Image (spheres, grey):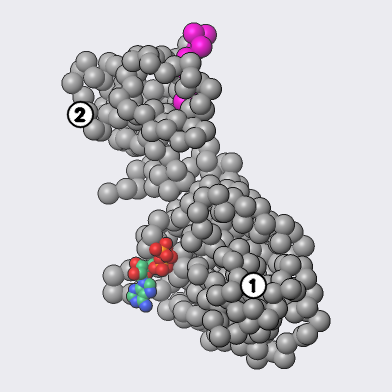
Amino acid sequence: MGIDIRIQKTYKNFKFDINMHNDAKMLGVLGPSGAGKSMLLKCIAGLVKPDDGKVVIGNRVLYDSEKNIDLPPQERRVGFLFQNYCLMPHLNVFDNIAFGPSVSGQKYDRQRIDMLMEKFQLTSLAQRRPSEISGGQQQRVALARALAVEPDILLLDEPFSALDNHLKVHMIQQMLEDLSNYQGMVIMVSHNIDEAYRLCDTIAVIHSGKMIDCGEKRMLIDHPKTASSARITGCKNIAPAMRINNTQIAVPNWGIELKTASSFMYTHGIAAVRANFIRMAAGTERENIFSICIRRTIETPFRVTLIFSFSDAHENGQNEQNGLLHWEIGRDLWETVQGQASLKIHIPPESALYLISDED
Ligand SMILES: Nc1ncnc2c1ncn2[C@@H]1O[C@H](COP(=O)(O)OP(=O)(O)OP(=O)(O)O)[C@@H](O)[C@H]1O
């Protein structure tokens, strides 16, 4: 089952113009706040009517402005898991799950609801109201309700945004297990690359109402198409750059020149280096070896982010703020470098990206 989506919708201060063809089983949609992520889901579910376009899921046309097709939400066979679950506070767990099909005008199938309750370990909670169960259990009720309508496609709108980090990891694992037998397609909206990466095979990046990148998740991390895509997928080190030759760029803010693995023809672009891809120099590398000065550190239990500038840049009086980069390392490496004011790092050419500028 795949999706074929072309949607245009214009508001006074926002233009949404998306073209998307995909047949991933789990598609992540990543983007900053206000990018249009929820809008995409609402247009698929029939909660917002596009000005123009087409929404096709598998071989079912849900919307086609040219052919005047606009199926009502209850006929779309779309399951929607909302950001805050939107459970009915006055209904118990069973009735909340049965509520999905009844909204869709279907008579609910008692056996199916019982099966879902058992699958999601909710049977013993059937008579409880949402306020009487935990956050994790509420999520399972919401998921069971979305699946009760036997959807062709399941839309998840930031399903983990309300959870703390620890619970989030657990719930993502749980969701993967819960959905393992689901045959339809899943689209999950998120603004968090870790979340999208854990759950989805393919990730689409949305920015200012447009899809700016889409691909298999590892490809997207290693080869984002534009500067915005790199930033939205978590790249911390981004600066204007100029081409010196096919595989050499200058980055004035950082005060360095970088060798790249791919070759480029455009004269002005953006340098991007992911904080996790920087290496400690081993002494055997031939290019992209730099002395750096550590300015600050940000410690978490398992990782440490070193905020640094390139030593040469500092001596050349480069702008202090623009010249700061992030290097994220494990605690074991941190134990060995801690206390050293100056270090030598290596940026592998394949990790030195030179991207098209699409930022203001
Ligand atoms: N009914 C509306 N009238 C005018 N503008 C709207 C309307 N609905 C949404 N928008 C605008 O469309 C843009 C996209 O909204 P959307 O809710 O899709 O963003 P989002 O990417 O889901 O953001 P968030 O991550 O904050 O939920 C926003 O700028 C929003 O203000």
Which residue is label 1 attached to? Answer: 141
Q: Looking at numbered disc 2 in the image, what kind of residue is underneath it?
A: Asn
Which residue is at the front of the view, 194 or 217? 194
Would you say the magenta stretch is mainly helix, strand or loop?
loop
Cβ atoms at labels 2 and 1 below 8 Å apart = no
Dot 2 surroundings within 10 Å: few (below 14), some, or many (20 or more)?
Answer: some
Q: Is residue 267 above or below residue 126?
A: above
Q: Looking at numbered disc 1 in the image, what kind of residue is underneath it?
A: Val
Which residue is at the front of the view, 142 or 38? 142
Point out the image quarter for the N terminus: bottom right
Q: Residue at x 72, y 67 (%)?
A: 120
Q: Residue 60, located in which quarter of the rendered image? A: bottom right
Quadrant containing ligand 1: bottom left
> Disc 2 on helix, strand or loop?
loop
Which residue is label 2 attached to? Answer: 319
Residue 231 seen from this side: yes
Q: Position of residue 242 (x, y in %)?
A: 31, 30
Residue 45 seen from this side: no
Horizontal placement of 336 versus 122: left or right? Answer: left
Horizontal placement of 68 versus 268: left or right? Answer: right
> Disc 1 on helix, strand or loop?
helix
Q: Write the start and end of the magenta stretch as one range.
A: 277-285
Q: Residue at x 55, y 82 (%)?
A: 88
Q: Position of residue 304 (x, y in %)?
A: 45, 30
Q: Residue 92, located in which quarter of the rendered image? A: bottom right
Q: Is residue 301 above or below residue 1?
A: above
**Mark carried by residue 322:** none
